[in-house]
Image (spheres, grey):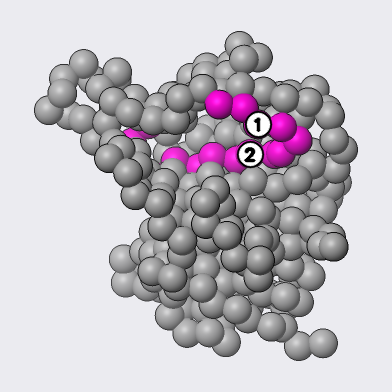
Amino acid sequence: MASVLDIRRADDRFHTRTSWLDSRHSFSFSRHWDPANTHFGLLLVSNDDVVAPGTGFDTHPHRDMEIITWVLEGGLVHQDSEGHNGVIYPGLAQRMSAGAGILHSEKNDSWTLTGEPEHEQPVRFIQMWTIPDTAGIQPGYEQLDINEELARGGWVTLASGMPEHASQRAIGIRQKHAALHVARVRAGETLRLPDAPFAHLFVAKGSVELEGAGPLGTGDAGRITGSEGQRLTAGPDGAEVLAWEMTAAVMVG
């Protein structure tokens, strides 16, 4: 069966705009609902968030979700009801397992870091949710700096629950059918997407040329059913890309 490529453009995403938040949603989220766009594979949420200095998401609950946060610019302060806290910055892989229930907050920490308002800057991050294998697990948290690995080039397995990635992943997730890879691709460099029943490519920064689809810019995504390792080549300014590899999909109905 040949691959099926579904390209989703950045400007076509659902959009939430408030005084402190500018958020683009790849799938149905919050008040934005489209029954034909609720997920892809096991990926339920892929939000591209920009949060203003001194603001953020106040304490709120989650349950039975594996939540991965990838910061692109600035710093994000995480605190949760399990006692975890810290600053998530570019290159730091972070996962929160909501499990049986957890409370957490996420705030733009730019003022906290510098103490000087003139250095305040927005924080931009991608937050992605996938369902766990098992409901009601003990909530958990894991993080790891992977900047060194990214600097070497090629794909880095940011998070995975797949047994075959046990020795090479940065952090684990409780989903044996999913893995998330990240790369900072130099101008003109070519990588191949994972071979998988479902592959989701998101261009977080820069631009790429995707085999069979053409150019993709910042915020564009490709949903590939039956991925055959399509090539992507970074544009003149390079690119930062996130690729989900999934061997199963959410059952609907």
Q: Looking at the figure, which quarter contains the N terminus?
A: bottom right
Is 246 positioned to the left or the right of 233 in the image? right
Circle 2 — which element? strand
Residue 116: x, y in percent? 16, 20
Q: Is residue 238 above or below residue 107?
A: below
Q: Is residue 91 above or below residue 152?
A: above
Secondary structure character of the magenta stretch overall: strand
Is 13 positioned to the left or the right of 223 in the image? left
Is 95 positioned to the left or the right of 217 in the image? right
Seen from the viewer's position, the closer of residues 94 and 10 is 10
At 65% from the left edge and 70% from the top edge, which residue is drawn?
Answer: 36
Farthest residue, direction top = 83
Q: Give the amino acid type for the residue marked by disc 1 in the picture.
A: His
* Residue 185 visible in the picture: no
* Residue 43 visible in the picture: yes
Residue 123: x, y in percent? 34, 38
Magenta-highlighted residues: 60-75
At 58% from the left edge and 19% from the top edge, which residue is drawn?
Answer: 80
At 52% from the left edge and 68% from the top edge, which residue is drawn?
Answer: 221
> Which of the 4 quarters of the picture holds residue 230?
bottom right
Residues marked 2 and 1 touching at CB (< 8 Å): yes
Q: Nearer the viewer, mark 2 or mark 1?
A: 1
Residue 240: x, y in percent? 44, 57
Comes first in the chain, label 2 or label 1: 1
Circle 1 — which element? strand
Distance of label 2 from label 1 (alpha carbons) = 9 Å
Q: Which residue is mark 2?
A: 67
Q: Which residue is mark 1?
A: 62
Farthest residue, direction left = 118
Residue 94 is a magenta residue: no
Q: Looking at the figure, which quarter contains the C terminus?
A: bottom right
